[in-house]
Image (tube, rainbow, N blue to C red):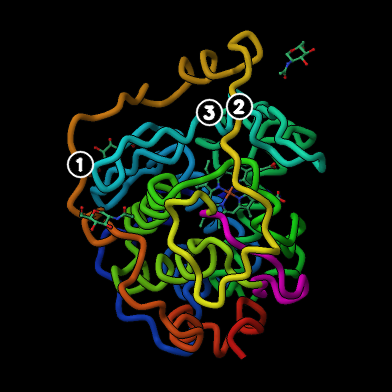
C-alpha cells in the first residue's frame, strides 16, 4: 500500500453534501474517488478502497461522516432478526480458514495490530501479518469489483489473492444471515461516505448474485483469473443457484471451535473502538433498512449488474462475466 498522506478534513469537505447523480459511463470507483478525493489517481483509488474497507471491518472511524453509524463486520449484530457474530472467523477461534488441507485451520487475522492501524488508514502494522494480506486483498478485490480504472498502475495493485471465493470461504459454512450482515456493513460503510442509495443497491445486488447462491456455476469475477467457483454463502439455508452445479462443490461443514487459549478475541475486544454488544432489536440505522434482504426476488441479469456497476465503460471488472 502506498502512503496515506491526506487531510481527512479537506478530503471529506464534499462528503456531507449530496453528490450529483453518477453518469452511466463512470464506474462507482472512479466517480466517488473524484467526488471525495478530487483527483482520480491510482493512489486516490487505493485510498478510497482503504477507507471504505477499513470502515466495513471496524465500523465508522473517519471524521466528519454523514451521520451513518457503521458497526462493522467484527461487531456482533442482527441480520433480519437473527443474531450474527462474525468475529470468531477472524480471531482464530474457529478452524475455518483454508490453507490447502482437507479441513479448516485456525488463523488469527487481527495479528497486525487489530483496529489501531485501520483507524490510521492502514491495513496493518506489519506487512508479513495475516491481517496485512487479508486487508490488502480486500482493497484490491473490491477495487476491481467497483471498476477502479487506475488499478494495476503504480499506487494500486491488481488483485493478488486467491481466485475462487468458494475456496477462500469453504470451511466457514457461511449462512444467509452471516452473508447478509457482511453485505449490510458494506452498504452502511458506503453510505457513511455519501455514496448514493442507488449505487449501494447496485453493489449489494452484484455481491448477492455473484457470491450469495450455493452451488453457483463457475463465474469470472476478476477477469485475469477466469471462471471460478464463487459461492460464499454455501450453508444449506442459502438459496440455490440457477443452473446449480452442486457436484463441483464439497459438502458444507460447520467449522470446529479452537480452545480459548489459542484465540485472540479477548485482546481484540479490549482494543475495539466501542466494545460492541449484541443489540436487542433490529438494525441500528434507517439506512440499513434498504438492504434487509440480500436476495432480490428475481436474480438480476448479468447485463443489469454490469450496467449498474458502471463497468461497461471501465476496463476490467466483472465485464468478462457479463459478456
Ligand atoms: C460478498 C461477500 C464477501 C466477499 C466479496 C469476500 C471477499 C473476500 C476476499 C477477496 C478475501 C481475500 C482472499 C485472499 O486473500 O486470497 C476474503 C477473505 C476472507 N473472508 Fe471474505 N468475503 C465476503 C464475505 C465474507 C463473510 C460473510 C465472512 C464471514 C466471516 C468472510 C470472512 C473472510 C475471512 C475470515 C477471510 C480470510 C480467509 C483466509 O485468508 O483464509 N468473508 N474474503
Ligand atoms: C460513527 O457515526 C455515528 C453517527 O454519525 C457517530 O455518532 C459516531 O461518533 C461515529 N463513531 C466514530 C468513532 O467516529
Ligand atoms: C428475512 O425475513 C423475511 C420475513 O421474515 C423473510 O421472508 C426472508 O426470507 C428473510 N431473509 C433471509 C435472508 O433470511
Ligand atoms: C494452540 O496453540 C498451540 C501452541 O501455540 C499449538 O501447538 C496448537 O496447535 C494450537 N491448537 C490449535 C487447535 O490451533
Query: For the residues marked 1 and 3, what is the alpha-carbon distance in whole angstroms?
Result: 21 Å
Q: Position of residue 35 (x, y in %)?
A: 42, 70
Q: Is residue 99 visible?
A: yes
Question: Residue reaching furthest top?
Answer: 261
| Residue at 42% over, 88% down | 24
Residue 316 is labelled as none
Q: Position of residue 172 (x, y in %)?
A: 59, 41
Q: Is residue 51 visible?
A: no
The vertical placement of 114 against 155, above or below, is above
The verdict on residue 47 being magenta is no
| Residue at 55% over, 57% down | 49
Q: Quadrant of the C terminus?
A: bottom right
* Closer-to-camera residue (60/43): 60
Which comes sooner in the sequence, label 3 or label 2? 3
Which comes sooner in the sequence, label 1 or label 3? 3
* Image position of 37 (left or right of 9): right
Q: Position of residue 182 (x, y in %)?
A: 44, 49
Residue 256 is labelled as 2
SS assignment at label 3: helix
Q: Position of residue 279 (x, y in %)?
A: 24, 30
Residue 88 is labelled as 3
The verdict on residue 226 being magenta is yes
Q: Nearer the viewer, mark 3 or mark 2?
A: 2
The vertical placement of 187 against 64, above or below, is below
SS assignment at label 2: loop
Q: Which of the four quarters of the rendered structure image does ligand 3 lie in?
A: bottom left
Residue 282 is labelled as 1
Neighbours of disc 3 within 10 Å: few (<14), some (14-19), many (20+): some
Q: Which residues are magenta?
A: 218-233
| Quarter residue 89 falls in | top right
Amino acid at each position: 500500500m502506498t502512503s496515506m498522506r491526506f487531510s481527512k478534513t479537506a478530503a471529506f469537505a464534499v462528503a456531507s453534501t449530496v453528490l450529483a447523480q453518477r453518469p452511466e459511463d463512470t464506474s462507482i470507483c472512479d466517480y466517488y474517488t473524484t467526488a471525495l478525493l478530487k483527483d482520480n489517481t491510482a493512489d486516490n483509488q487505493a485510498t478510497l478502497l482503504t477507507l471504505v474497507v477499513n470502515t466495513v471491518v471496524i465500523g465508522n472511524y473517519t471524521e466528519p461522516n454523514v451521520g451513518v453509524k457503521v458497526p462493522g463486520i467484527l461487531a456482533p449484530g442482527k441480520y433480519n432478526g437473527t443474531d450474527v457474530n462474525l468475529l470468531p472467523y477472524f480471531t482464530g477461534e474457529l478452524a475455518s480458514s483454508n490453507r490447502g488441507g482437507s479441513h479448516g485451520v485456525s488463523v488469527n487475522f487481527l495479528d497486525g495490530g487489530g483496529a489501531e492501524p485501520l483507524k490510521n488508514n492502514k491495513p496493518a502494522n506489519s506487512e508479513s501479518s495475516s491481517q496485512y494480506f487479508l486487508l490488502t486483498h480486500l482493497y484490491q478485490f473490491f477495487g476491481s469489483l467497483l471498476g477502479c480504472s487506475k488499478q494495476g498502475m503504480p499506487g494500486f495493485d491488481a488483485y493478488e489473492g486467491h481466485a475462487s471465493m468458494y475456496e477462500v470461504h469453504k470451511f466457514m459454512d457461511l449462512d444467509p444471515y452471516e452473508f447478509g450482515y457482511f453485505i449490510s456493513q458494506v452498504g452502511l460503510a458506503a453510505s457513511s461516505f455519501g455514496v448514493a442509495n442507488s449505487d449501494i443497491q447496485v453493489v449489494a445486488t452484484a455481491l448477492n448474485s455473484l457470491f450469495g447462491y450455493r452451488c453457483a456455476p463457475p463465474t469470472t469475477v476478476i477477469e485475469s483469473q477466469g471462471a471460478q467457483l464463487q459461492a460464499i454463502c454455501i450453508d444449506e439455508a442459502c438459496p440455490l443457484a440457477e443452473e446449480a452445479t452442486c457436484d463441483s462443490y464439497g459438502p458444507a461443514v460447520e467449522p470446529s471451535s479452537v480452545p480459548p487459549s489459542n484465540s485472540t478475541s479477548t485482546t481484540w475486544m479490549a482494543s475495539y473502538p466501542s466494545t460492541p454488544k449484541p443489540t436487542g432489536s433490529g438494525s441500528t440505522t434507517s439506512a440499513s433498512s434498504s438492504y434487509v434482504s440480500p436476495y432480490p426476488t428475481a436474480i438480476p441479469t448479468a447485463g443489469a449488474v454490469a450496467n449498474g456497476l458502471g463497468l461497461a465503460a471501465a476496463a476490467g471488472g466483472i465485464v468478462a462475466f457479463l459478456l
